[in-house]
Image (cartoon, rainbow, N blue to C red):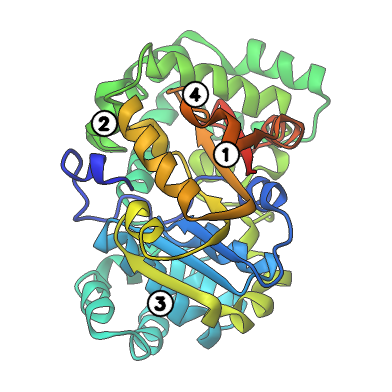
Amino acid sequence: MSTEIAGKAEFEAIRYAQLWEDADVLTAALGPRPGGTLVSIGSAGDNALAMLLLDPAEVVAVDLSAAQVACIRLRVAAWPLLAHDELLELLGFRRSARRGVLLDRVLAACDADTAAFWAARRGEVVTEGAGTIGKFERYFRLFRTRLLPLAHSARDVAAIFEPRSREERARFLDARWNGWRWRLLLRLFFSRAAMGALGRDPAFFDHVEGSVSAHVARRIEHAFVANDPVDNPYLRWIMTGSHGVRLPLAFRPEHHSAIAARIGRLRVVHGTIEDVAAGGLRADGWNLSDIFEYMSPEGFADTYRAILAASRPGARLAYWNMMVPRRVPAAFADAVVERRDIAEPLAARDQAFFYRDFIVEDVR
C-alpha cells in the first residue's frame, strides 16, 4: 500500500484472506527472472509465492497491514511443513476435520507475533479455514448464501460452469441469468456503499467516478461470455464457495514442491512500497496489484518516481486498474516502454474479472 492510503483506510483486520488477482496473468507478464529481484504487494501472499516459480533470487512481499503480513507468514511457515492436501485443508480450500492439528503444526514454526495472531483466530480457522476469513471473502459468502438464492436456484448456479461455446454462453447470460432480480441484486449489493462497508474499505473508492455496480455488471459479462467460466477459480469461488478442480496458480499440486523448495527466497516486509523502494533495493520486476487506484494523481506520480529509482534497466512493472485509469504519469513517459503487446492479450484472458485493464511497462 502507499503511504497516502495509510491515513485513510483501516488495516487492522484481514481484508483479503486469499488473492483476487490472476497469478497466471501476472507471472506470464513478468516472465522468467532467474537470479533477479522481484517485489510484490503482499496481500495474502498467494501471488508473491507464485512469483517464486519465475526462479528469482528473491521475492520481496510488502504490505502495510500487519494482518496481511500474518497471512503471508502463515503460508511461508506452512508450505515446507504441509503436504499439498494439508495446505489446502488448512486454508479452507478443501473440507477438513483436522485443521486444528494442522494449524498447531504450522504455528510451532512461526514467529511469536504470527503465532499469537492466528491463535486468537483459531476457532475461525478450524471452522472455515485460514484462507476464507477475510473481509472480502465474508462479503462474497454473504452474497452467495443469503442473496444469490433470491435471484437464482442452485441449478442455475451450477449451470454457469457447464461447457458451452461463446455464443451459447451469451444466450445463457441473456436468457437465463440476467433477469430483473439479478440486476437488482447487482445494483444493491455491488454498490459503492455496500462494497465499501462490507468488502473493500470506503477509502479505496475515493478516486472512483461512475457506478461501481455498473462496472461489476460489465465485468460479469466478460467472465460469463468472453472467457469460459468452466475453469475460472475466482468466479467459481464467488458463486459456490469452492475453486473447483482448477486452483489458483500457487496452489496447483504440480507447483507445491517448487514453491516449498524456494520459500527461503521470499522476504516479508511490513511497510509500504515506498519503504521498499527507498531501502537500497534494485528490482527486476514489480507486482503492484491495483495500488495506484487508491492514490491521487500527485501521489501516484510520487510513488511511480520512487519505483523507477529502485528499478534496474529492463525491470518490468505489472499492475491492474479496476475503475480508476492509471498508466505511466506523463512526466515519466520517456522512462518506460508501454508493453501493450504483452498486456492486452493477457487482460483478455484474465480470470479475476473485476479489473478492466492490465498494464505492463518496461523500465528503459
Query: Which of labels 1 and 3 is toward the front?
Result: 1
Closest to the observer: 72 or 315? Answer: 315
Q: Please give the name of the residue rendered at 23% of the width and 31% of the height, measured from the top-left corner.
A: 202
Mark 4 or 1, nearer chain start: 4
Marks 3 and 4 sit apart, C-alpha to C-alpha, by: 51 Å
Q: Which residue is at 30% across, 47% downward?
A: 135
Q: Which residue is mark 2?
A: 196
- Callout in the foreground (3, 2): 2
User: Do callouts 2 and 1 mark residues in contact (Cβ within 8 Å)?
Assistant: no
Check contact, mark 2 vs mark 4: CB within 8 A. no
**Residue 352's disc number:** 1
The residue to which callout 4 is attached is 330
Quadrant for the C terminus, please.
top right
Q: Residues within 10 Å of mark 2 (few under 14, many from 20)?
A: some
Residue type marked 1 = Ala
Q: Secondary structure at mark 1?
A: loop
Label 2 to label 1: alpha-carbon separation = 19 Å
